[in-house]
Image (cartoon, rainbow, N blue to C red):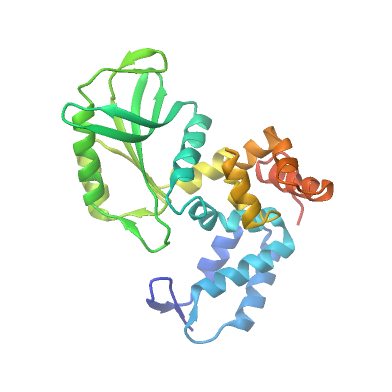
Amino acid sequence: MKVTKFSGEIVTFEKDKLRKSLLKSGASFEAVSRVISTIEKELYEGIPTKKIYKLAFQLLKKVSNVHAAKYNLRSAIMALGPAGFYFEKFMARLFEREGYETLTNQTLEGKCVSHEIDVIVKKDKVVSMVECKFHGSQDAKTDVKVPMYILSRFNDLNQQQYTFFNQEATLAKCWIVTNNRFTTDAIQFATCSNLELLSWNYPPGEGLKDKIDNYHIYPVTALTTLTLAEKDKLLAQDILTARDLIMDKDCLRKIELSPSRIKNVLKEANQLCDLLKITT
């Protein structure tokens, strides 16, 4: 059976790959088997993978909202667009979970020109700049031109003194973060140039998806119990993650959710943050 990827490429349907993806959501083997069995009955030659993904999400949601939310994580990250402003703020939250102090949306004067920096982070007295490359399509990749360009900006900044976190410091490191993938050349150039990279699947075992799962810091856009409009209203309140929502429960009242809706949303958020037991 052939399927059509997002890019239009025709490939062979891989049931094991789908099973692995579904199991990563936390659903049981039995639940995943039922989902796959239903999907196989809907397959036809050339079916778009987007349609398979949507069907899998709908079926998984019947099993558990939280498993569906985790399965939908990549789309939830892309929902932090379209410009990527919320993605930058989300990344600051992630760095904070790793023990960093953070600043966002900083304008710094370099040796030659001024630069707008997405995130400044500090840990163990080391101050670094973080540049976020947001993509609104799953097929887009960050190529070698991006680390080349960002390296030139870093070189214009790293010899200057700045005041960050109430102390004088220089920028010692540079991170490049993307919600998609880097090309092989981009990784090779960045490694050679001592740039730190973080993408959906890189570094292996420590990519963006791995960090989100490990720290249970899921974007509020992942929640299946909220509408798109409600998620937008929460983002506008600076509620970027499910954890933010739990810490500021009043934000749900502000967007006029009913008491029963608030209860359901908080239940999903707590389960997503691994604060409540999930059963399937």
Q: In the rendered view, does 83 fall on the left or right side of 110?
A: right
Residue drawn 69% across and 62% down?
61
What is the number of callouts on the image? 0
- Is the residue 63 above or below the residue 247 in the image? below
* Quadrant assignment, res 172: top left
Q: In the rendered view, does 58 fall on the left or right side of 153?
A: right
In the rendered image, is residue 249 in sight? no
Instruction: State the residue in front, 87 or 202.
Output: 87
- Which quadrant is home to the C terminus? bottom right
Instruction: State the residue in front, 164 or 182.
Output: 164
Position in image of residue 114 (x %, y %): 24, 31
Instruction: State the residue in front, 100 or 108.
Output: 108
Residue drawn 20% across and 45% down?
148
In the rendered image, is residue 227 in sight? yes
- Is the residue 154 above or below the residue 87 in the image? above
Position in image of residue 224 (x %, y %): 67, 56
Residue drawn 36% across and 54% down?
181
Please identify the residue farthest to the left as the structure is shown: 112
Residue drawn 24% across and 35% down?
194
Q: In the rendered view, does 65 fall on the left or right side of 99?
A: right
